[in-house]
Amino acid sequence: MNFELTPEQISAYQENGFVVIDDFLTPDELEHWRAAVTEAVEERNGQKMPGKAVKVGEDDGINKDADYFNNVFDQLLNLWQTNDKVKELMLDERIGKMAADLAGVDGIRIWHDQALIKRPWANPTSWHLDTPFWSFSDRRALSIWVALDDATLENGCLFFIPGSYHKTTFENPGIGKNMGEIFDFYPQFRHSKSVAAPMKAGSCSFHNGLTIHGAHANMTPGFRRAMTCAYMPDGNVYNGQPNILPDSYLQHIKPGDLLNDDAQNPLIYKR
């Protein structure tokens, strides 16, 4: 695993709100990740996340255009909670340190992992932000995005608006089918130049949860699979948004309470 960040990579992330790391996984590690994720997805039998009844393809109430969005990608969350092989991958302290170094924090917790699978001919993923969906509000939160297949201009690679995270807020435009809707909320970026992030399988990117990002449609008959994980800096508190928290957890938490339950959000790195 290529887990040693250079000062240049950290600086690029802090300036732009994203960074691509080529050849993050070795060929053997890539095959292990593919096998683990495939097994975990199959075990779920369509259930999007533990503790929730929503299935892949059903309206989860988050997205504005459910019929359209259900053909953007299959999304399965918190696979680490239901598959030991994925758990071993997601709780890797080395990745936690990478996230902490990029975010400039002393401790990192998993917020949620998710497999994102663009099927053949899938719709584009419109420009959006991540953190406004989550149950905490922290400008340093970030995600890793690991390419399990080559992510190309043709099959749905990521795009970013460089530096946008410095000026976006926790206002949530949501994810709809109008690619440009986010610029009604953040008009200062309407004429910004986007940056494509094609990646070979086994490469990865990190991006801040307030960086404006999206993805192309899949214009091919093949799949574009990615395994991702969102990270919460340690010490955050519940902001009142349920997001991925299971109902059993929500019964015992109120806004302002620390999100420090290791069964739900494990601390994977601390200095």
Image: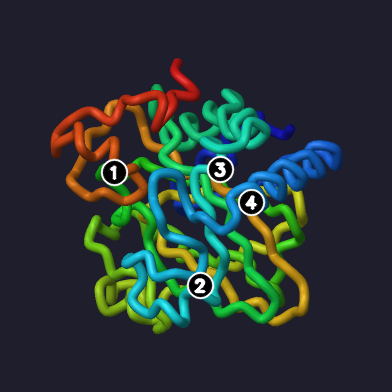
First along the sequence among labels 1 and 3 = 3
Proximity of marks 3 and 4: CB atoms separated by less than 8 Å: yes
| Res 37 seen here | yes
Whole-percent x and y of residue 18? 51, 52
Say which quarter of the image contains residue 33.
Answer: top right
Q: For the residues marked 1 and 3, what is the alpha-carbon distance in whole angstroms?
A: 17 Å
First along the sequence among labels 1 and 2 = 2
Q: Identify the residue position indicated by label 4 in the image.
A: 41
Amino acid on which disc 1 is placed = Asp
Q: Identify the residue position indicated by label 1 in the image.
A: 247
Q: For the residues marked 1 and 2, what is the alpha-carbon distance in whole angstroms?
A: 28 Å
Specify whether 70 is left or right of 53: right
Nearest to the eye among marks 2 and 4: give it.
4
How many numbered circles are shown? 4
Q: Residues within 10 Å of mark 3 (few under 14, many from 20)?
A: many
Asked which secondary structure carries label 1, the reply is helix
Q: Identify the residue position indicated by label 3 in the image.
A: 79
